[in-house]
Image (spheres, rainbow, N blue to C red):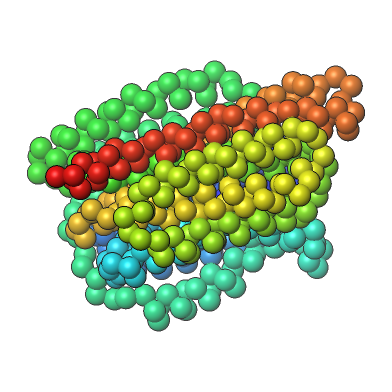
Amino acid sequence: MALLDATVVNVATPTMRTGLHTTGSALQLIVSGYTISYAALLITGARLGARHGFRTVFLIGLATFTLASFGCGLAPGAGVLIAARVVQGIGAGLMVPQIYSLIQLTFEGPARARALSLYATVIAVAVVVGQVAGGLLVSADLFGTGWRPVFLINVPVGLALLLAAVRLLPRGLPRSDKGLDLPGLVTLTAALLLLVVPLVLGHEQRWPLWTTVCLAAAAPMFALFVVVERAVARRGGAPLVPGRVLRSRHLVCGATSLFFGMAGYAGFLFSFSQHLQSGLGESATRAGLTFAPLALGVATGSLTWQKLPTRWHLPMIAVACTLAAAGYLGIGLAMRQGGQGGLVLPVLQLVWGLGLGYTTSPLLTLALSKIAPADASDASGVLTTVPQLAQVVGVAAYGSIFLALADRHGAGGATAVRTAAASADALHTTALPVTAGALLAALAVLPLLLGKRHRERR
């Protein structure tokens, strides 16, 4: 639900704008208010879970998310909807980090790898499902409610999950007496907001000066966060992100590879969706269904990689990243020719999906493999933040490249043929840096692969 709600609204925005008689800026905040509050709270949510109980904080987050979804569905105007979306993001930020922690503390060995594989499948597939579900719900216009079922569908699902969570989630897991680290919380939240807000809002507002200032200030703020965390550690406190967590090579390499992989996935999926709908004129539902081979590939890779011998897992990640890169490049070339891409498009999407599926799940397992149970919540906060930030950065960076090129080449006498050609060329050009990013994801695990081979020779 949390990941689906980050994308499901995109399909419903035209209907929202008509139904609420709202401005473009308000519409942006309806879409992005959720993402901003969600991304900013993930690491803090993980610490709250460790301190007050993962089960308890998960239930609070799920209840908050469900109630806010109800508020979104009944919102009488844009202002109420924006506020409800922010609260929805807070609920997701409390709920999602507990999943990693619960998996870390309640599963071991192959069972943990299977649980992480299922979770990784959900992460990757939810983005595609969000677009399909949004198109179907809006097109159905149930009982004349327009866009409202996009949010209201969460209510019965959330209530069912609350009942299941109360009954099934483990009680009595160890809690931490770590404090909240308020200096770290303030500086990290400020750094994340300085990065996320301009990336989310920048393109629609044509990158005004404040977006440049915020992005320029983000790096110094992250540096200040590091300084603050070291000071907290020297005083004997509990920093929000302990240094020993970031000293784990498996976590750093895994998270880096995951960042490049998810950024490319989200950015190219956004660009491809825009090409199908704006360039080729397909409906949201049909565009979403076009990605069925991608979802199949992701699910297949995520659920079968463990059947390979353990010694193959690290090389498999590097090969899978390269496979995803081939999928991006192939789709860009196939769509550049114009039209629907023919029979080769489903094959290339399957290749892309398999590359992603054989990457995301193993990376989550790899990143957490050397983390002590005592640090599970802190590592969970980092690992839940990385994919979320990656998606925001990917859509902002790669999406902006696509939109800028499509708008520039399609301007002036933009007939349907000209628009489609400009969009196809923009998608091909966007595929090039996305392909490079996927190859960087492969290179990120190279230090672990070389280290493993060095140990085997010894």
Q: Position of residue 405 (x, y in %)?
A: 70, 24
Of all residues, the one furthest to the bottom in this rendering is 167
Q: Is residue 213 above or below residue 39?
A: above
Q: Which residue is at 33% across, 68% downward?
A: 110
Q: Position of residue 312 (x, y in %)?
A: 36, 54
| Residue 304, x across and y down, in percent | 47, 63
User: Percent position (x, y) of residue 351?
Assistant: 59, 49
How many labels were placed on the picture?
Answer: 0
Which residue is rendered at x = 59% and y = 23% of the image? 207
Image point 65% across, 38% down: which residue?
Answer: 330
Q: Is residue 276 left or right of residue 57?
A: right
Which residue is found at the position 64% from the left and 64% from the top?
152
Q: Quadrant of residue 183?
A: top left
**As rendered, which of 76 and 90 lies closer to the eye?**
90
Is residue 431 visible in the rendered image? The answer is yes
Quarter occupied by the C terminus: top left
Viewer-side residue, 134 vs 158? 134
In this orientation, does residue 92 appear?
no
